[in-house]
Amino acid sequence: MTDNGATPRLKARFYDEVAAALQDELRLGNPMEVPRLHKIVVNMGIGEAVRDRKQVGVAMKELALITGQKPRLNRARKSVAGFRIRKGMPVGVSVTLRGDRMWEFFDRVMSIAIPRVRDFRGMKPSSFDGRGNYSFGFDEQLVFPEIHYDQVSETRGMDITICTTATGDDHARAFMSAFGFPFRVTESLY
């Protein structure tokens, strides 16, 4: 449940409509086999923190605004001289969303953030990892309405991984398509 006690819109839709339809479509005998959302991981790299330490706090604040949850600071595991990174330096921030926050974020990504991407032609249907997880990225954090354009000092990209309980890519693709996830239509070349 959200802060106001209401069930997220897509979660209610999943249990009311989508789960039964997916069970029939995928010919699953047990309703517990139906693919579900497991977690959503949002990762934002902060490579510019090498030059400016204040960017770490700014990135953490922006990711907290976008996800509604305090992000975790990720540090370098080893030194890389080519990138001027030493072991222990902050290199990114990440958030793992579960429960109702995960459903609300999934809804906001599909209904608000993706339509705000410039020159959008659909999400790549080949970005599944073979185990039912889908990863994609945004080039800038400005696609989320929580981030005000006037207050942004530097644009940052972010990677989003949607983890499902699906056993394979076909089941995960069917799960996401049931919600209207905007996959790119592949065209034949003849």
Image: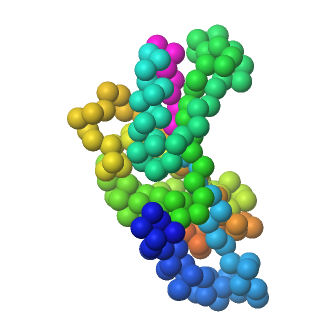
Which residue is at a point 51% across and 16% down the rendered structure image?
50
Residue farthest along the front direction in this orientation: 4
Instruction: Check the image and tell me how it is coloured.
Output: rainbow
Q: Is residue 7 shown left or right of residue 115? A: right
Residue 20 shows up from this direction = yes
Q: Is residue 185 shown left or right of residue 95? A: left
Q: Is residue 90 above or below residue 131?
A: above
Q: Quadrant of residue 35?
A: bottom right
Residue 129 x/y as whole percent: 68, 54
- Asked if the stretch drawn in magenta spans residue 131, the answer is no
Which residue is at a point 66% across and 85% down the rendered structure image?
23
Magenta range:
44-51
Name the one closer to the observer, 127 or 151.
151
Which residue is at a point 58% across and 32% down the rendered structure image?
73
- Asked if the stretch drawn in magenta spans residue 50, the answer is yes
Q: Quadrant of residue 97?
A: bottom right
Name the one closer to the observer, 43 or 23.
43
Q: Quadrant of residue 141?
A: top left
Name the one closer to the observer, 124 or 52.
52
Which residue is at a point 35% across and 28% down the rendered structure image?
154
Residue 58 x/y as whole percent: 41, 30
